[in-house]
């Protein structure tokens, strides 16, 4: 190469055309990798959740409740989360279980990205990474599939986003009494939407209650309780709580939504938020609460805190103590209070990048390496997902791979060809999925609150294969009994010996269909 050509080529260098805002760093790549990992893992999770198929069958409206469960006649019932049921059933009608799987993975990933961004903006990259790991763990331990609680998580994050400015990490602090009309209207619309998709809006109302009481506590300590009651900020937050509560009445049930919360049987809270059980400290939720409080106390010694930042982990502790599944909602809020205590006056990007800008003003050729890494991970996440495989011409997943191997696909095809004539007894964990495929009236289903307790006791006797099961079957005029071969060995042994007036009309490696002899 001649000297002139060498000099000409050396005078031209590649320059970055992207702005500095596109320069990502190592912690961005870590957070991106965690989000993509969650998306991929949930994409291949079988759609076998009982809660998912319960929402599908409720949203389809093929059969009324008394047609699905004839023995529920006379029992009061309350249908909560109707909007979620309609959405989930519509997704299933459009593209089946594959779209349900994709929707669950997308929503959970978007919620993770939202909380991670909020934690990163307030507390920095370390808290954001820890928060991502905690929420990924929650997604696998407590997520029940695509159900109304999935949409409730979206609403809870939206509430946290609206209240985050008032948590005291900004300077100057944002007071709610100075909030714009948009913020007030957004809260009202949010709770109206939330009440129609999931009953977890009660968690949001409890947080808003802490939001109002905490400012009264702060003002009482400084100026006395009488002046605190007359505080414009306190009255604004109380009004906010009242508006949010009133907005929950915008639902098809109206005021009956609140009346149903005091029911002793068929209480919709049990089905929405789970059973109230004490959480042992020697468990993952207990360990999270203990470690969270240890970090919170250590950080609170270095900075002044507010009552709301203290009330948030207290609410999370009380909720998790009585129901460990509430960790899905309350763990992010706990982490948010820790992030507020760790808040800095400068953003993470400014604090990390300040040393690099002072050391050298010369451009670095590898400054976009983590940006390219994030782009590569996003592309790989899409390519290896089931939908990416379909777009790129890959092989479609089989029905067994999508819904899981524990659902009786062969039995459902048999029932389509030979539908039962009358009432049938079916394992509860199969009932909703079967009713999405075949119109069959069942003795008991997943919505046990609408079934009399005597019927539930008789169902358990049949399921466990107790001696009186033929007499109970005659009592309810059952046309058939579906048996789970993996979990009903006692009943299987008894029917193998032969039972008068009953015969096996279908059997595969998963299930047995026992029908009345005609």
Image: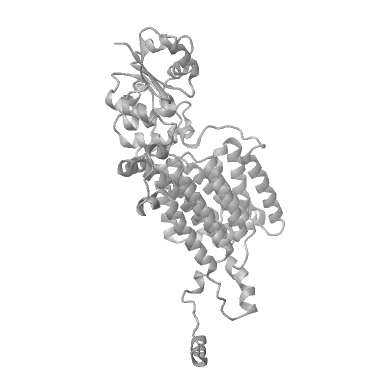
Foreground residue, 516 or 91?
Answer: 516
**Which residue is outermost to the top?**
500
Q: Residue reaching furthest front?
A: 1
When asked about the image quadrant of residue 516, the answer is top left
Q: Residue visible at 62% across and 42% down?
A: 317
- The total number of labels drawn is 0
Question: Does residue 54 lie above or below 157 as drawn?
Answer: above
Front residue of 416/329: it is 416
| Residue 211 drawn at (x, y percent) | 55, 51
Image coordinates of residue 294 in percent, x first then y, are 70, 49
Name the one closer to the observer, 209 or 400.
400
What x and y, as percent, mark residue 175? 54, 60
The image quadrant of residue 93 is: top left
Q: Residue at x 54, y 68 (%)?
A: 369
Residue at the extreme bottom? 4
Residue 278 horizontal side relative to residue 106, left or right? right
Q: Nearer the viewer, residue 177 or 91?
A: 91
Residue visible at 55% across and 75% down in the picture:
365
Percent x, y for residue 103?
40, 47
Left or right, 141 with reference to 254? right
Q: The C terminus lies in which quarter of the figure? A: top left
Q: Is residue 381 visible?
A: yes
Query: Residue 121, can we see it?
Result: no
Q: At 66% from the left edge and 42% from the top edge, which residue is drawn? A: 287
66 versus 39 height, above or below? above
Q: Is residue 483 above or below residue 474?
A: below
Considering only vertical position in the picture, is 395 above or below 345? above
């Amino acid at each position: 190469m001649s000297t002139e050509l060498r000099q000409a080529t050396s005078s031209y260098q590649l320059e970055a055309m992207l702005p500095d805002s596109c320069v990502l760093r190592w912690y961005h790549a870590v957070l991106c990798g965690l989000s993509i990992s969650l998306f991929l893992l949930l994409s291949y999770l079988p759609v076998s959740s009982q809660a998912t198929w319960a929402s599908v069958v409720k949203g389809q409206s093929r059969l009324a409740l008394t047609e699905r469960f004839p023995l529920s006649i006379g029992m009061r019932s309350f249908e909560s989360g109707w909007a979620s049921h309609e959405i989930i059933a519509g997704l299933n009608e459009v593209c089946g279980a594959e779209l349900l799987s994709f929707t669950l993975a997308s929503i959970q990933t978007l919620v993770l990205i939202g909380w991670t961004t909020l934690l990163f903006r307030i507390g920095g990259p370390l808290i954001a990474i820890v928060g991502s790991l905690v929420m990924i763990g929650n997604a696998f331990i407590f997520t029940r599939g695509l159900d109304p609680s999935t949409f409730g998580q979206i609403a809870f994050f939206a509430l946290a986003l609206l209240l985050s400015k008032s948590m005291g990490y900004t300077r100057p602090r944002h007071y709610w009494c100075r909030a714009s009309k948009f913020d007030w209207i957004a809260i009202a619309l949010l709770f109206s939407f939330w009440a129609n998709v999931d009953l977890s809006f009660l968690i949001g109302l409890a947080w808003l209650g802490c939001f109002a009481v905490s400012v009264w506590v702060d003002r009482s300590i400084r100026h006395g309780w009488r002046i605190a009651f007359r505080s414009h900020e306190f009255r604004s937050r109380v009004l906010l709580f009242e508006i949010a509560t009133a907005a929950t009445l915008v639902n098809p049930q109206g005021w009956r939504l609140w009346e149903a919360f005091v029911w002793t049987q068929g209480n919709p809270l049990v089905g929405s938020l789970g059973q109230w059980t004490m959480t042992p400290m020697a468990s993952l939720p207990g360990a999270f609460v203990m470690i969270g409080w240890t970090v919170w106390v250590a950080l609170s010694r270095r900075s002044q805190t507010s009552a709301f930042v203290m009330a948030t982990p207290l609410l999370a502790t009380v909720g998790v103590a009585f129901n460990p599944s509430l960790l899905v909602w309350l763990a992010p809020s706990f982490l948010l209070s820790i992030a507020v205590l760790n808040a800095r006056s400068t953003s993470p990007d400014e604090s990390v990048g300040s040393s690099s800008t002072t050391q050298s003003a010369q451009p670095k050729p590898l400054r976009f390496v983590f940006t390219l890494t994030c782009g590569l991970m996003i592309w790989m996440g899409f390519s290896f997902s089931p939908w990416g495989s379909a777009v790129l011409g890959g092989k479609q997943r089989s029905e067994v791979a999508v819904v899981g191997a524990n659902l009786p696909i062969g039995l459902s095809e048999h029932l389509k060809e030979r539908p039962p004539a009358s009432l049938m007894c079916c394992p509860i964990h199969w009932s909703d999925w079967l009713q999405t495929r075949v119109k069959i009236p069942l003795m008991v289903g997943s919505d046990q609150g609408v079934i009399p307790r005597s019927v539930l006791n008789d169902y358990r006797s049949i399921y466990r294969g107790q001696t009186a099961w033929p007499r109970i079957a005659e009592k309810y005029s059952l046309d058939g009994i579906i048996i789970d071969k993996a979990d009903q060995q006692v009943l299987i042994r008894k029917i193998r010996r032969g039972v008068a007036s009953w015969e096996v009309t279908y059997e595969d490696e998963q299930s047995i269909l026992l029908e009345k002899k005609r």
